[in-house]
């Protein structure tokens, strides 16, 4: 029988040769296992916390030193009697030499590969010693770069391109330089005669939703004869199918099954159906009935297509995901590693992060290519919650090499991780890399007229990886769609083509630095990256300032170190000064950048969801914000900070991804009296209103539009019955903005008309609401606070607040003194006659404080 024993106890580590971390010959006991060096040095108080102040630069020596980990474990006579005994290393970061009882058994060169070493010949009853010696990945990378040449990249040290290690460790435009090192995944002792080396369970769901299942089993070695059994069980543990006496020949076996539509429940993304999870139990026995090995794998069944077909009313092709014949608008986020120190992440933290995604009405997450192939638990939770996963291969922002030794590492890495991940119903696409084609275009090294080369001898050698190696491995080992890159348009086409494939739309913030109001003009078929920076919660800022009040201003050295984006001061200030009359004290700067981020990102989702029109008019089929999370406490594009404190943008996006939403634009149309005069014209303000419906059936509702003059008691309202088309947007109104006179002079100040639109069901329940304000906000002369009639009432249980007003208010952010509160909404617009209740878990009756535009603190 195959048995696996985890080696988690009695590990110690040392700095080879001694130094800052340990004295020469000093071994420190580890506090946990798996682990990495920084984590242990922190717990042993041998280094300062790199997340605080400028301490990041006090610990750079750690990643440029060599380290060793040692373990002594007992082996029983029973274990020694097994035919085979292997040591299995699920992940070593990164360059390691492994010795067992004084014998060298392994060299490793790839953080993303699991290694297996036979050790029976060196094994003994009683104490056995395992030593793993790690060399500095940074220094090894520099050696490889000297041998193979320097290549182009964005972010980090160029030597990273030669090292198969999490690339963000080298520093990114949102993360620190923290070169981790150590045994970051489990180490186990595997005893066996024969074991199941590969269990490949694949399903094929037809358009009629028939389910075909194949189970392919591969043993570690050939056996003279044996039998396999396959049992399929439901989530309730009831047996759906049991097949035994499957003959094992030449070390492999296959079983095939077919199920009529409806026999098996299908897996759906969140919001479109259930997520039934089945288990397949596989057992291998010899002819005498002795069990050799068993494996259990959780599976689900779904039909997924990436649909790229002509649109009926625009150039180009769709790029959309279809699950079980339902076309899905994908509203979601990009995911980076959730910590600079990966071994500190627990299943509970993963679940909390992914729960935040779902609670924010998102249905897709993209695992970005500069981090890691995530732990199994990450994908397990996505399966359970119904989150669609876009999975990059781990190449990011670089001109990667393709020399033979590098390519062999990549091939094994890709094969192992495709096999590990392929059974997850949540994973719907593999993408070859992040932005590598875009980088190649920027330095003019890609020839898109060439689709047939080997590419290894070209200036863009990694095309061999993305167009030869990875697609062949994906096709061989799974049924998941492969996409050459993110972004990628189509063969022969640049990555910025907005009519094909996916798009990284960085012309807001980066690039041409467009106003965020132009998101509708910047739309692509599937926008897999876009973003805007915003400061985190002030508590997070104070955390990294570590009590140093002299640094508590936006331009301080410490705050500068906790924002890694190039030119962030210019970009933040560009968008702030164009839109807001803002202040520079720390609390105000946090507020204004947060409101700016919320306005920017909500606008993108609102406008792009409008583009999901259904029936061959899916002009934009997805929007994935960069990014949901941080790997350390910092200011970045994240919508939730390192401590899982949601920024106001998180809530603004959540509102735009509800099942029913309403959107508005106001645009000025200038009409000249004739072609000869530039002085005679009229300016008309046009209001457009639309609704979206994420359900699969039409929705009858009432549209209510109310207009307010910010400076008087004037108001007007109109309403009408409407029907929202299923799974699409519906245009509801287009006409002159009520109350806004036609202007004939450029310097004529328009009335400050605020428009509130709501969707109401038959009972009067608000299905969706949105307020549209004149912009830029910096031109608005907000009423005095005492004239607003603004009220914040705390409920009797102290766990919610009711907001009401007699004048429109823009951009309310709630907070209180002391401990955090879990608010259910932020960045709130409030109008008369439409009070809003906000849950406030943990408020405990404390006074809720509100900040908003024009509140007098600027």
Image (tube, rainbow, N blue to C red):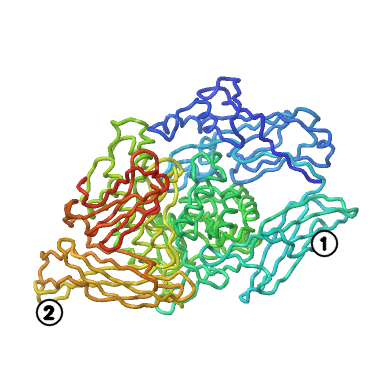
Within 10 angstroms of label 1, few (less than 14), some, or many (20 or more) residues?
Answer: some
Query: Which one is closest to the eye, mark 1 or mark 2?
Result: 1
- Residue 22: in sight, yes or no? yes
Classify residue 414 as left or right of residue 46. Answer: right
Q: Where on the picture, by quarter, is residue 494?
A: bottom left
> What element does badge 2 sit on?
loop
Residue 806 location (% of width, % of height): 22, 59
Are the residues flagged by discs 1 and 2 in contact, CB closer than 8 Å?
no
Residue located at (49% from left, 40% from top): 340
Residue 295: x, y in percent? 74, 52
Relative to 737, does residue 232 appear above or below in the rendering? above
Residue 477 in view: no
Q: Nearer the viewer, residue 202 or 301?
A: 301
How far apart are the alpha carbons under marks 1 and 2? 86 Å
Q: Secondary structure at mark 1?
A: strand
Closer to the camera, 529 or 838?
A: 838
Q: Residue at x 28, y 31 (%)?
A: 550
Q: Which residue is mark 2?
A: 674
Q: How many marks?
A: 2
- Across and down, in percent, residue 264 comes to 67, 68
Q: Is residue 741 left or right of residue 387?
A: left
Q: Which residue is mark 1?
A: 244
Q: Residue at x 50, y 43 (%)?
A: 160
């Amino acid at each position: 029988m195959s048995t696996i024993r985890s080696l988690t106890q009695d590990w110690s580590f040392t700095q080879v040769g001694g130094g800052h971390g340990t004295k020469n010959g000093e071994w420190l006991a580890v506090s946990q296992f798996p682990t990495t060096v920084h984590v242990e040095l922190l717990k042993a108080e041998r280094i300062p916390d790199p997340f605080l102040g400028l301490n990041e630069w006090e610990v750079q020596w750690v990643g440029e030193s060599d380290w060793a980990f040692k373990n002594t474990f007992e082996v029983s006579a029973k274990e020694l009697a097994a035919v085979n005994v292997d040591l299995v290393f699920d992940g070593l970061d990164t360059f390691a030499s492994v010795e067992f009882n004084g014998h060298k058994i392994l060299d490793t060169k790839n953080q993303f590969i699991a290694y297996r070493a036979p050790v029976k010949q060196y094994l003994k009853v009683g104490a056995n010693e395992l030593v793993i010696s790690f060399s500095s990945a940074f220094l090894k990378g520099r050696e490889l770069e000297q041998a193979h040449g320097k290549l182009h990249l964005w972010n980090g040290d160029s030597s990273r391109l030669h090292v198969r290690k999490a690339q963000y460790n080298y520093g990114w435009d949102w993360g620190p330089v923290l070169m981790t090192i150590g045994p970051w995944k489990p180490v186990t002792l595997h005893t066996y005669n024969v074991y199941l080396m590969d269990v490949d369970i694949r399903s094929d769901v037809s358009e009629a939703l028939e389910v075909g299942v194949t189970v392919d089993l591969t043993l570690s070695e050939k056996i003279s004869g044996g039998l396999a059994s396959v049992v399929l069980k439901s989530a309730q543990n009831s047996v759906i199918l049991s097949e035994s006496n499957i003959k094992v020949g030449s070390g492999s076996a296959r079983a095939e099954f077919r199920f009529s539509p409806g026999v098996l429940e299908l897996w759906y993304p969140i919001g479109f159906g259930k997520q039934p999870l089945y288990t397949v139990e596989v057992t291998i026995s010899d002819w005498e009935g002795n069990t050799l090995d068993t494996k259990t794998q959780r599976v689900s069944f779904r039909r997924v297509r990436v649909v790229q077909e002509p649109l009926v009313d625009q150039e180009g092709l769709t790029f959309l995901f279809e699950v079980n014949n339902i076309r899905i608008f994908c509203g979601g986020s990009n995911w980076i590693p959730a910590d600079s120190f990966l071994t500190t992440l627990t299943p509970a933290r993963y679940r909390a992060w992914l729960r935040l995604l779902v609670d924010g009405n998102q249905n897709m997450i993209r695992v970005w290519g500069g981090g890691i192939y995530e732990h199994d638990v990450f994908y397990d939770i996505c399966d359970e919650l119904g989150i669609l996963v876009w999975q990059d291969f781990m190449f990011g922002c670089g001109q990667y090499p393709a020399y033979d030794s590098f390519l062999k590492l990549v091939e094994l890495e890709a094969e192992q991780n495709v096999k590990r991940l392929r059974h997850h119903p949540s994973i719907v696409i593999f993408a070859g890399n992040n932005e590598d084609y875009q980088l190649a275009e920027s330095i003019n090294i890609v020839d898109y007229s060439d689709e047939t080369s080997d590419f290894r001898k070209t200036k863009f050698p990694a095309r061999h990886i993305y167009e030869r190696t990875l697609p062949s491995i994906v096709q061989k080992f799974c049924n998941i769609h492969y996409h050459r890159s993110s972004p990628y348009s189509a063969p022969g086409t640049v990555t910025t083509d907005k009519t094909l494939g996916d798009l990284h739309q960085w012309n807001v913030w980066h690039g041409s630095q467009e106003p965020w109001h132009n998101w509708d003009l910047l739309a692509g078929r599937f926008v897999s990256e876009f973003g805007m920076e915003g400061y985190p919660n002030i508590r997070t800022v104070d955390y990294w300032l570590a009590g140093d009040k002299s640094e508590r201003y936006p331009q301080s050295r410490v705050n500068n170190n906790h924002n890694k984006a190039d030119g962030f001061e210019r970009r933040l200030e560009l968008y702030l000064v164009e839109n807001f009359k803002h202040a520079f004290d720390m609390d105000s700067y946090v507020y204004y950048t947060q409101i700016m981020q919320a306005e920017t990102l909500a606008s993108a989702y609102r406008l792009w969801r409008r583009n999901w029109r259904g029936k061959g008019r899916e002009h934009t089929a997805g929007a994935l914000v960069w990014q949901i999370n941080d790997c350390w406490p910092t200011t970045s594009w994240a919508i939730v900070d390192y401590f899982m404190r949601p920024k106001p943008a998180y809530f603004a996006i959540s509102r735009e991804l509800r099942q029913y939403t309403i959107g508005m634009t106001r645009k000025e149309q200038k009409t000249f009296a004739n072609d000869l005069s530039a002085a005679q014209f009229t300016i008309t303000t046009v209001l457009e209103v639309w609704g979206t419906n994420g359900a699969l059936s039409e929705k009858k509702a009432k549209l209510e539009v109310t207009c307010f003059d910010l400076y008087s008691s004037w108001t007007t309202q109109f309403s009408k019955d409407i029907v929202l088309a299923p799974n699409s947007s519906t245009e509801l109104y287009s006409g002159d903005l009520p109350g806004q006179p036609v202007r004939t002079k450029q310097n004529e100040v328009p009335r400050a008309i605020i428009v509130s639109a709501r969707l109401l069901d038959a009972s009067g329940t608000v299905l969706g609401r949105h307020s549209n304000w004149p912009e830029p906000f910096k031109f608005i002369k907000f009423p005095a606070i005492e004239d607003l009639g603004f009220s914040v009432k705390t409920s009797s249980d102290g766990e919610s607040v009711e907001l009401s007003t007699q004048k429109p208010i823009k951009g309310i952010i709630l907070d209180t003194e002391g401990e955090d509160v879990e608010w259910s909404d932020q960045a709130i617009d409030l109008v008369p006659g439409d009070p809003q209740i906000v849950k406030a878990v943990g408020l405990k009756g404390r006074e809720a404080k509100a900040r908003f535009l024009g509140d007098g603190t600027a």
